[in-house]
Image (cartoon, rainbow, N blue to C red):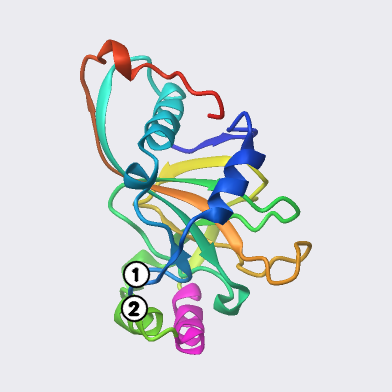
Amino acid sequence: MHVIRDNFFKNPDKILEWANSLEYVENNNNYPGRRTEELHEVDPEFYHQTVQKIMMLLTDKGYEYNISMHFQKVPEVWGDGVIHSDGHYNAIIYFNKNDNAGTSLYRIKDRYGYNPPNYGIIREGFESDNPNKVNIEKEKIRDTFEKTLDVKGLYNRLFLFDGCEFHGANSFKLENSKENEERLILVMFFHKIAYKDLSPDAKLAGTYI
């Protein structure tokens, strides 16, 4: 299942201004660039309202959830994304106004002759902040896949998809943005969604969401 919803937030400019005011932490060995701390700790109201708005696109039932949410900035030196899969649903909201560097989904070209990529080398490159090491290895990985869906990263567009599908960022190089502007997304990882009765105070009631 894929969900694409344009103009997701009512006031994305306000959220963009806030996102640029936050502190971003250097990467670990799992991703390029930098992320904020978990947004459920930074701003619980924004976190819960955003999750609820996404869930309203999917169901009118009550639910409980465990979702990681961060803003993430990636400079162009990282080239494009590593094709990979996760064990949960993912959601991305794009926040670059003049670029559309989005996300693509892939499938394995030859499933019977497929050998899993050595993602250990990729993680070493992230951990040591070595884009060249990552870029060389990910090109080897890319040759084993073919693209099945290309979603443009339009400003304030939501893309919700099954992270078990192979996917990767199209590009971290922004052609039409300001000098030194980095690719900025709001990224979410859905670790758990379970139906339950919503309490009265859990209703969506946001002004900028």
Residue drawn at (32%, 19%) of the image:
202
Query: How far apart in space, not on screen, are marks 2 and 1 (Cα)?
Result: 6 Å
Q: Is residue 202 above or below residue 124?
A: above
* Left or right of residue 22: residue 151: right
User: Which residue is situated farthest in the top direction here?
Assistant: 200
Instruction: Give the numbered dot on residue 111.
Output: none
Q: Is residue 42 above or below residue 136?
A: above
Q: Image quarter for residue 200?
A: top left
Q: Label 2 belongs to which residue?
A: 123
x, y percent for residue 62: 28, 17
Q: Amino acid at mark 2?
A: Arg
Q: Label 1 belongs to which residue?
A: 30
Q: Earlier in the sequence, mark 2 or mark 1?
A: 1
Magenta region, main secondary structure: helix
x, y percent for residue 136: 49, 87
x, y percent for residue 155: 67, 45
Q: Amino acid at mark 1?
A: Asn
Residue range highlighted in magenta:
130-143
